[in-house]
């Protein structure tokens, strides 16, 4: 399978950027910046699919709701990472992974880097754990790629990512805990909710922490709480770009965008769907925000 982005890295780039499909990057944007996106595999009814390749978002959620069961997912193979490192076509590569606190992908990437020492002896490869997920991870990958296209060295790219890491945030409202409970990844959410699957948790993911910050009994209260938290952070950090994320909830995402624009008229807003693999855990109906403080 071809796991590379559609276009090559900039001729001036010394550093290639790689990330997993759970970063929710738009393929055209990733391709324009030379980012190599590795599709994450998942299994439905015994058949293996690849995130962002084999099923549209709409088809995935139709199958998810029809089956009523969360698909099995796994980290990409070391070979898939090595293919992406090779396809970057640069002497240096940074792989921006989803947080190791919520996934084994960072460990799989480390294994791939070890194997790549023999297969790609002339390429220096560094893993950067984003400490977060979805478009918060994606925003870090995008910033790294833009910096790399200026001709920045490997150390410069890694230093910038380290500086930005703690400011990358994902804040979501889960409409259902059904699928998360099936995967066994409830963790602190289950403890805070007391085992009630009908509640609407507001979950924050940043700097290696994936935890509920508030439990609400209605969806509207949860969305109000999430928006209030975003507004407070954006105003205090002078953030200028916020990504609205959703899982099979495009009309509600449009409504959330309108309300967010009313509260934060100076902020640039975009809407990006959750990747199918992320939706495996979140289930349909998720709404959320991703942002990088100060940008």
Image: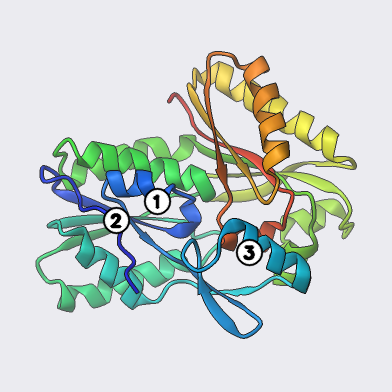
Callout 1–callout 3 Cβ contact below 8 Å: no
Task: Check disc 1 and report its element: helix, strand or loop.
Answer: helix
Residue 106 sits above or below residue 241 on the image: below
Q: Residue at x 86, y 58 (%)?
A: 197
Residue 60 on image: x %, y % = 63, 64
| Pointer 2 local density, CA inside 10 Å: few below 14, some 14–19, many at least 20 | some
Q: Is residue 167 visible?
A: yes
On screen, residue 182 above or below 97: below
Question: Which comes before the other along the chain, label 2 or label 3?
Answer: 2
Of the numbered discs 1 and 3, the one sitting upstream in the chain is: 1
Q: Is residue 139 above or below residue 125?
A: above
Q: CA distance from mark 2 to mark 3?
A: 23 Å
In the figure, is residue 217 to the left or right of 74? Answer: right
> How far apart, in angstroms, are the residues tagged by discs 1 and 3?
18 Å
- Residue occupied by mark 1: 27
Q: Which mark is residue 60?
A: 3
- Asked if marks 1 and 2 touch (Cβ < 8 Å), the reply is yes
Q: What residue is pinned by disc 2?
A: 6
* Quadrant position of the C terminus in the picture: top left
Q: Residue at x 58, y 60 (%)?
A: 276
Under circle 2, the secondary element is loop
The front one of 159 and 85 is 85
Give the number of marks. Answer: 3
Q: Position of residue 198 (x, y in %)?
A: 89, 53
Residue 196 figure quarter: bottom right
Q: CA distance from mark 1 to mark 2?
A: 8 Å
Q: Position of residue 169 (x, y in %)?
A: 54, 38
Instruction: Give the mark, 1 or 2, whose residue is nearer the N terminus.
Output: 2
In the rendered structure, the answer to whether residue 271 lies left or right of residue 179 reads: left
Say which of 283 and 131 sits in front. Answer: 283
């Amino acid at each position: 399978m071809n796991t590379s982005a559609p276009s090559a890295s900039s001729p001036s780039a010394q550093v290639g950027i790689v990330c997993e499909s759970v970063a929710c990057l738009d393929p055209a944007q990733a391709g324009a910046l030379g980012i190599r996106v590795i599709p994450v595999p998942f299994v439905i009814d015994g058949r293996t699919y690849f995130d962002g390749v084999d099923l549209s978002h709409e088809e995935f959620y139709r199958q998810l709701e029809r089956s009523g069961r969360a698909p099995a997912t796994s980290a990409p193979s070391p070979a898939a990472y090595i293919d992406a490192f090779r396809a970057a076509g640069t002497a240096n590569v940074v792989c921006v992974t989803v947080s190791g606190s919520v996934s084994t992908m960072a460990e799989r990437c480390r294994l791939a880097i070890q194997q790549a020492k023999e297969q790609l002896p002339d390429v220096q490869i560094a893993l950067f754990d984003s400490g977060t997920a979805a478009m918060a991870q994606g925003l870090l990958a995008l910033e790294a790629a833009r910096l790399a296209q200026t001709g920045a060295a490997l150390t410069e790219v890694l230093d910038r990512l380290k500086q930005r890491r703690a400011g990358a945030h994902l804040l979501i409202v889960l409409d259902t805990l059904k699928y998360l409970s099936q995967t066994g990844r409830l963790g602190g959410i289950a403890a805070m909710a007391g085992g009630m699957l009908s509640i609407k948790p507001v979950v924050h993911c940043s700097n290696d922490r994936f935890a509920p910050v508030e439990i609400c009994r209605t969806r509207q209260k949860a969305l109000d709480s999430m928006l209030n938290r975003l507004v407070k952070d954006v105003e205090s950090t002078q953030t200028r770009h916020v990504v609205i994320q959703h899982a099979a909830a495009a009309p509600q995402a449009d409504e959330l965008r309108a309300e967010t624009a009313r509260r934060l008229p100076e902020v640039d807003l975009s809407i990006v769907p959750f990747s199918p693999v992320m939706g495996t855990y979140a289930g349909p109906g998720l709404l959320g925000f991703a942002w990088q403080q100060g940008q």
